[in-house]
Amino acid sequence: VTEKGEKVIENGIVRDKYTVLRLTKVAKFQSGNGFGEVALLKHTERTATIQAQEECHLAVLTRFHYKNTLERSQREIIDAKVNFLMRFPMFAMQGEAHMRNSHYYAKPATFTRGEVVYKEKDLCEKVFLIQK
């Protein structure tokens, strides 16, 4: 909890924390917003001073916990993509380890109803795998 006028982050100071706002509005930030991630990830000085305009409740993550959370969410995204690709025999026979090393080549694409995906006589440069 910070008091009105208390500095939450100060310009030019290197800190080891990421902050998420809860319950109240602070300056331009509102509940659910966060700040401090750029300096935290780059381990550089803060580029701004954040000062509480009213009492606010903050959740603070250390560098370790913030990076761990990001890495875990990235792993979940990669796992979902690899699991999807492994459903296709042409990828399953390559093995999961190979797919983990090459999953990033599979880029998502969305087409709306009636949109042409490709036309007859177009050069074939892609294969399309239907997710849903």
Image (cartoon, helix red, strand yellow):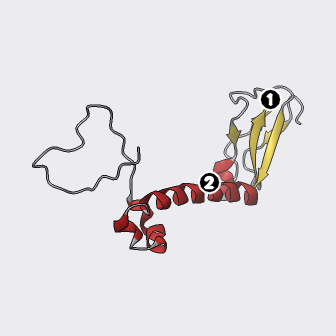
Q: Which mark is residue 73?
A: 2
Q: Quadrant of residue 94?
A: bottom left
Query: Could one spot residue 44 in this view of the protein?
Result: no
In this orientation, which residue lies closer to the viewer: 48 or 81? 81
> Which of these two is toward me, 30 or 119?
119
What is the three-letter code of the residue carrying label 2?
Answer: Ser
User: Could you tell whether 67 is left or right of 2 in the image?
Assistant: left
Above or below: residue 25 compared with residue 92:
above
Q: Residue 92 is drawn in which quadrant?
A: bottom left
Image mark for residue 129: none
Q: Earlier in the sequence, mark 2 or mark 1?
A: 1
Residue 73: tell me if it is visible: yes
Labelled disc at residue 23: 1
Please indicate whether residue 37 sits to the left or right of residue 24 in the image: left
Q: Quadrant of the C terminus?
A: top left
For the residues carrying marks 2 and 1, which lies nearer the camera in this image? Answer: 2
Residue closest to the eye, 38 or 104:
104
Q: Please name the amino acid that badge 1 sits on.
A: Leu
Instruction: Tell me residue 75's x, y (percent).
Output: 59, 60
Count of numbered circles in the view: 2
Q: Residues within 10 Å of mark 1 (few under 14, many from 20)?
A: few
User: Residue 32: where, in percent of width, then height?
Assistant: 71, 34
Residue sitting at x 34%, y 67% = 90
Which residue is at a point 66% across and 45% down the rendered structure image?
47
Q: Position of residue 84 (x, y in %)?
A: 45, 57
Compared with 18, 34 (above or below) is above
Q: Secondary structure at mark 1?
A: loop
Residue at image coords 73%, 45%? 11
Tell me the SS state at disc 2: helix
Q: Quadrant of residue 43?
A: bottom right
Q: Residue at x 76, y 36 (%)?
A: 21
